Amino acid sequence: MRELEPGEADYWVSHDRFLTILDRIASHPARERISITFDDGNASDLLIAAPELRQRGLRAQFFVLTGRIGKEGSLTADDIRTLIALEMRIGSHGVGHRDWTRLTANELLYELESSKAQLEQICDRPVNAASMPFGWYNGAVLKQIRNAGYRAAYSSGGGSAKVEGFLKPRNSVRSETADSWLDDVLSGKIPFWRKLRNAARTKFRV
């Protein structure tokens, strides 16, 4: 396993907990409207996540950091192709795990275009979605993502995503996530304060 970044451990869950979460999703009445995503391109995406998803008839989108492809603890190019064969989707998480809001225009363009081109070469199909590292973004970042040819940008601000929307908020599952919170999110019961926060982000940052 690779060395974790500061704060990253909070986003890893035990194997048993992971299976419990998948079971709750698989048994949910609205399972067809629930999107599952994974960031970074860890080796566990193929070793653990994909088989358990398939067993439950679930699909997911995996956002890969191309700068880590083939490195210890990360997916290889062949692993990514296997995920495609398992009917999973692949998206870009950039080249390195960098805050896109702090990059120059040229640096961000490199993160977006280089990763997209490499993943499309590996997958032999278009890569149309990008996940923003740390979930951070601003208007300039979203504009660059569009200009680079992506059709969707995934954040981590929480909330419900519209199928036709370009900016897609996600709800992060952490090691301490309670079942009650998970059930509320799966049912679309987003707390009012979170809706206000997302509305403010859309109005003032997009």
Image (spheres, rainbow, N blue to C red):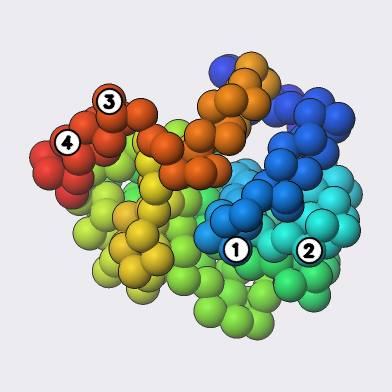
Q: Is residue 178 left or right of residue 160?
A: right
Q: Sequence order check: which comes first, mark 4 or mark 1?
A: 1
**Dot 4 corresponds to which residue?**
200
| Closer to us: 32 or 54 | 32
Mark 2 residue element: loop
Q: CA distance from mark 3 to mark 1?
A: 26 Å
| Closer to us: 3 or 164 | 164
Q: Is residue 19 left or right of residue 155?
A: right
Q: Is residue 56 left or right of residue 120?
A: right
Q: Sequence order check: which comes first, mark 3 or mark 2?
A: 2
Q: Sequence order check: which comes first, mark 3 or mark 1?
A: 1
Q: Is residue 54 left or right of residue 138?
A: right
Q: Residue 193 got which mark?
A: 3
Looking at the rendered structure, the kind of residue marked 4 is Ala
Q: CA distance from mark 3 to mark 2?
A: 34 Å
Residue 4 visible somewhere in the drawing: yes
CA neighbours of label 3 inside 10 A, class few (<14), some (14 to 19), many (20+): few
Looking at the rendered structure, the kind of residue marked 3 is Trp
Q: Are marks 3 and 1 in contact (CB under 8 Å)?
A: no
Q: Sequence order check: which comes first, mark 3 or mark 4?
A: 3
Q: Residue 47 got which mark?
A: none
Residue drawn at x 20%, y 40% as measured from the top left: 199
Looking at the rendered structure, the kind of residue marked 2 is Gly
Q: Which of the two discs, 4 and 2, sits closer to the camera?
A: 2
Q: Are marks 3 and 2 in contact (CB under 8 Å)?
A: no
Location of residue 62 in the rendering, given as x and y in whole percent from the top left corner: 64, 56
**Dot 1 corresponds to which residue?**
32
Displayed quadrant of residue 201: top left
Mark 3 residue element: helix
**Dot 2 corresponds to which residue?**
57
